[in-house]
Amino acid sequence: MAGVKEDDVLVRDESFVKYERLLSKAESEGRIDGPNKCLVCGMRYLSKDEADHCCRINT
């Protein structure tokens, strides 16, 4: 959450640092906005094989 300093400049709280680190990691791994999408859950991947094996049930 953004806090307000005395001079009305928004300052980012430290509580979102881990979230943003995890978000950037997910983006770099292709889990967000990757070119290939799982047809069942919609999660995105960099490779078509990963997307095909995402929700596959192994019997």
Image (spheres, helix red, strand yellow):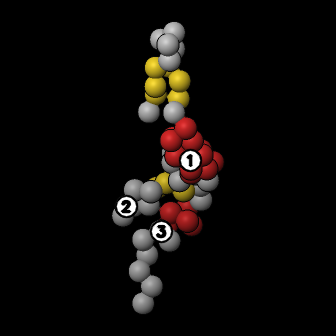
Q: Are marks 2 and 3 in contact (CB under 8 Å)?
A: yes
User: Which residue matches tag 1?
Assistant: 18
User: Which residue matches tag 2?
Assistant: 41
Kind of residue at disc 3: Cys
User: Which residue matches tag 3?
Assistant: 54
Which disc is residue 37 wearing?
none
Q: Could you classify mark 3 by the number of other residues whose Cα lies within 10 Å: few (under 14), some (14-19), or many (20 or more)?
A: some
Give the foreground label among 3 and 1.
1
Q: Earlier in the sequence, mark 2 or mark 3?
A: 2
Q: Earlier in the sequence, mark 1 or mark 2?
A: 1
| Viewer-closest of 53 and 26 | 26
Residue 27 showing in the rendered view: no
Kind of residue at disc 2: Cys
* Mark 2 element type: loop
Q: Position of residue 55 (x, y in %)?
A: 42, 71
Give the foreground label among 1 and 2.
1
Kind of residue at disc 1: Lys
Residue 33 showing in the rendered view: yes
Q: CA distance from mark 1 to mark 2?
A: 25 Å
For image coordinates 41% across by 80% down, the residue present is 57
Question: The C terminus appears in which quarter of the rendering?
Answer: bottom left
| Vertical position of residue 8 compared to residue 26: above or below | above
Question: The N terminus appears in which quarter of the rendering?
Answer: top left
Q: Position of residue 29 (x, y in %)?
A: 61, 53
